[in-house]
Each structure stands twice: as C-alpha cells, then as structure tokens.
C-alpha cells in the first residue's frame, strides 16, 4: 500500500500517469458507459443496464487511479428492502464510491441541471434517475411521484441532502426532501459517510490533478420509521446528520455554511 503522502518523485510520476494513461482511459470509459446505458435501456431493463455498467465504470475510475477503497456496514442491510440512502457530498468521487461500492441497485435523485450534460444527461435519463424539478408545486409533485414509482422491489434511492459539493470537506445543512419522501413511503433511511473524496479532488475552480488518498464508504444502520409527519421527518434528518458527521475525521467535523446551497 502507498503512503498517504507521496514523495515529490512519486508525485511527478503519479501526475504523469494521470495525464498519459488514466485521463484518456477515463474519458473513453465514460463515453462507452454512457452509450451502453442508453442503448441497453432502450432494448432491455433499466434496472439492469442503468446499474451494472456504471457500477463497473465507477470501480475502474477508482482502481485506474490506484485509489484504495474500504467499505464498511453492507451487512446491516436487508437483501430485498428498499432504502433511502443519504450521504454527505465531499466531491466528484462520491459518485464513484457509491455507484461502485454501495452494493445495491438504486436510482439517484439529482439536480435537474445535470440533464443538460452531453451524453451523461441522456444516460441518466435512460437509466430512470430522478431529476429534481423545483420550478413549481406541480413539478415537485411529479418528482415525488417518480420517486414512489422507483422505490419498489428492493430498488433504493440515493440522495445528497446538502444539494451541492462541499467547499471545505465539512458538512453543510441537510434539506428535507429525501426525508419527507421516506416518511411518506414509510421507508428506512440509511446514513452513509463518505470520507476521503475531498482529499482526492477538492472543489475548486479549473481542472486539477487527483491527489492519492484512501477512500472510505461507511454504511450505517438503517433508521426505521417510528411515526409519521413533520416531527418524524426532523428526527430522522437530525439523526442521519449526526451519524454521518460522527464518522468523519476530526478535521472535517463541525457545521460549515456552504454558499452554494
């Protein structure tokens, strides 16, 4: 295993490897995965083609950059149970960690603006992921109805309740939407702690190199519904927030306002 801090010599070759090998392979695999999803979902089941190709792609995105991944807590989940997974949002590698290593067939709840990304937006739409539309009450209702249709037969939902990536590695406030949907459908909420993604690729302007750092995905015990209504939503939200926060390294603990929320 590598040391967390690479020497200047190793850092130079790691960056050279990224430019000459990892980046071209990442671009090629991303395009091929998106095309596979679009075609596969057009002729087959979205639950299959919308999950397995991106799962393989996500693992390659981690392994291709030599990033070790540790997963904890999968044994806490029931095989055929649908869940609403809520995770902190440290950076782009959150996507690869969850898609590649969560080990559950799921749909994302994502920003409507992501639909406009060439090829990737179409692949997400074909896979049946849920684009959050907040343009009005009817649009919000349609989003909720799509969520209800998805959360059946063991298929789960993954949400970043912060809504946007962290600028500091710390957690910002959680929005209530995912917890309200879980409350309406009487589904357990599973807090997920992502650790290391901010260290690998922090949020900043422009394009930057990936920094070598271990990645950790912690799946916590499901929080089962005890009641229903606004108080129950708030209870699950607060418990999820505290659970995720508690498993972060000390340097990333504590609330920090995210100006992008």
Image (tube, rainbow, N blue to C red):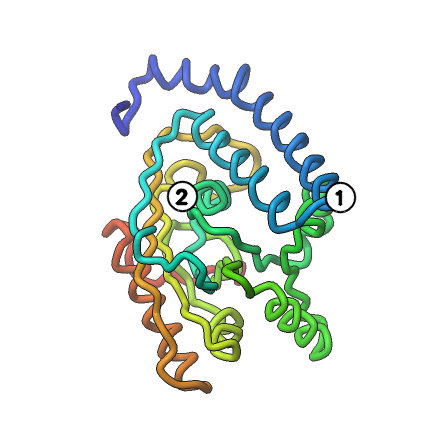
Residue 259 showing in the rendered view: no
Q: Which of 154 and 103 is in front in this view?
A: 154
Residue name at image x 33 percent, y 17 percent: 8
Asked whether, in this view, residue 1 is left or right of residue 157, the answer is left
Q: Quadrant of the N terminus?
A: top left
Q: How many labels does the image show?
A: 2
Asked which secondary structure carries label 2, the reply is helix
Residue sitting at x 48%, y 15%: 16
Could you say where residue 105 lies in the image, as x and y percent from the top left? 51, 51
Name the residue beneath numbered marker 1: 43
Q: Distance between the residues labelled 1 and 2?
A: 38 Å
Q: Where is residue 234 in the image (x, y as percent from the top left)?
A: 40, 79
Structural crowding at the residue carrying mark 2, measured as other residues with C-alpha within 10 Å and reported as few (<14), some (14–19) or many (≥20): many
Q: Quadrant of residue 85 in the image?
A: bottom left
Query: Which residue occupies 56% across, 55% down?
Result: 108
Question: Helix, strand or loop at disc 1?
Answer: helix
Res. 107 in view? yes
Q: Which residue in the structure is indicated by mark 2?
A: 198
166 left or right, relative to 5: right
Q: In this view, does 139 lie above or below 216?
A: below
Q: Name which residue lies at 74% across and 39% down.
A: 39
Where is residue 143? Give x, y as percent: 66, 69
């Amino acid at each position: 295993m590598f040391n967390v801090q690479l020497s200047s010599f190793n850092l130079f070759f790691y960056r050279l490897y990224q430019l000459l090998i990892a980046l071209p392979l990442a671009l090629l695999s991303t395009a091929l995965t998106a095309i596979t999803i679009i075609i596969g979902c057009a002729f087959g089941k979205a639950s299959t083609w919308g999950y397995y190709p991106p799962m393989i792609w996500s693992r390659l995105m981690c392994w291709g950059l030599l990033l070790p991944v540790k997963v904890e807590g999968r044994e806490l989940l029931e095989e055929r149970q649908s869940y609403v997974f809520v995770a902190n949002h440290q950076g782009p590698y959150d996507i690869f960690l969850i898609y590649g290593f969560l080990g559950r067939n799921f749909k994302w709840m994502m920003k409507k603006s992501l639909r406009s990304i060439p090829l990737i937006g179409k692949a997400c739409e074909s896979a049946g992921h849920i684009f959050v539309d907040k343009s009005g009450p009817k649009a919000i209702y349609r989003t909720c109805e799509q969520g209800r249709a998805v959360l059946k037969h063991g298929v789960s939902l993954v949400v970043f309740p912060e809504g946007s990536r962290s600028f500091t590695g710390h957690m910002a406030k959680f929005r209530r939407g995912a917890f309200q949907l879980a409350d309406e459908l009487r589904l357990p909420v599973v807090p997920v702690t992502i650790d290391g993604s901010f260290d690998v690729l922090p949020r900043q302007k422009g394009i930057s190199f990936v920094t070598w750092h271990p990645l950790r995905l912690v799946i916590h015990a499901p929080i089962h519904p005890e009641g229903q209504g606004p108080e129950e939503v708030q209870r699950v939200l607060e418990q999820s927030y505290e659970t995720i926060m508690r498993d972060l390294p000390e340097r990333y603990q504590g609330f920090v306002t995210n100006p992008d929320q």
